[in-house]
Amino acid sequence: MRMVLGSSRTAGARISAKETSFTITGGIEGAELLANEEFNLQWLTSGQAVPTVDLWLGLDGHCHDILIAEDVPNDGSYLWTVPNMSSDFASLVVCPSTGTEEGYGMTSSRIRILGHAIRYVSAAGSNTAPYTTPQTAAHDIQDALLACTGADSVLVAGGQYRGNMVLSGPVALLGGYSSDFSTRDVETYETRRAGGGPTWRRLVHQQRLAQHPELPFHR
């Protein structure tokens, strides 16, 4: 079902009740949310009282076509599990369960949702973007990092890799996997990389946020 502002779930009649308005609160405005984490959505209601509300999510800032929950008791809060998808322009709508002709409330600042995927690096892969299966694994770690769109994990098979690496967002980088990624043993499947110099450094597990783009490595 697609939610269109100004529509009603009640067929054949226009709602004539006094309009209800909602103010979405609780720190969601401009927030950066991680997929699969819980966030307590909060709102205030004014005008005509309504017993239940529907909550909708939009990923492009305009169309709210993802139903979060329907017929939620209008007590001003709902514990939401953030879906595993990515958007820099997400927004939310709260409306009466009977439809938005009675009124609605929408976030005014964009919300960023950081979804996550697993990406693979191995000399045995086909080097086919977006590198989300062992069979299509990237040959270069940086290529897999560039393909990341959210809070992704990059798994690296044992071997030696060259090149500098720069992160553009939250990423977990883990080495020590077998070529088919069925086993992880950092001693057996040692993963090493060299930057611009001759020194090979061991890659075990590194994680950095976007504001800290330099990735250190264990020797």
Image (tube, rainbow, N blue to C red):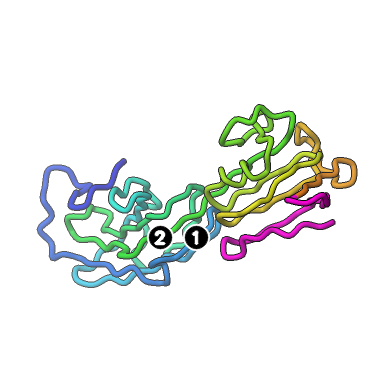
For the residue marked with disc 2, what is the amino acid? Ile
Q: Quadrant of residue 158?
A: top right
| Relative side of 46 to 209, left or right | left
Percent of width and height locating residue 203: 79, 51
Cβ atoms at labels 2 and 1 below 8 Å apart = yes
Q: Position of residue 11 (x, y in %)?
A: 17, 43
Q: Which mark is residue 33?
A: 1
- The answer to whether residue 203 is magenta is yes
Q: Position of residue 119 (x, y in %)?
A: 63, 41
Q: Mark 2 Cα within 10 Å, few/some/many (few <14, many 20+)?
A: many
Crowding near the residue tagged with mark 1, few <14, some 14–19, many ≥20 C-alpha atoms within 10 Å: some
Mark 2 or mark 1: name the one nearer the start of the chain: 1
Helix, strand or loop at disc 1?
strand
Q: Residue 170 carries which label?
A: none
Percent x, y of residue 14: 11, 51
| Most frequent secondary structure within the magenta stretch | loop
Q: What element carries label 2?
A: strand
Image: 84 above or below 213: above
Question: What residue appears at the point 29 percent right and 48 percent down from the top-left corner?
Answer: 63
Write down the region rendered in magenta.
195-219
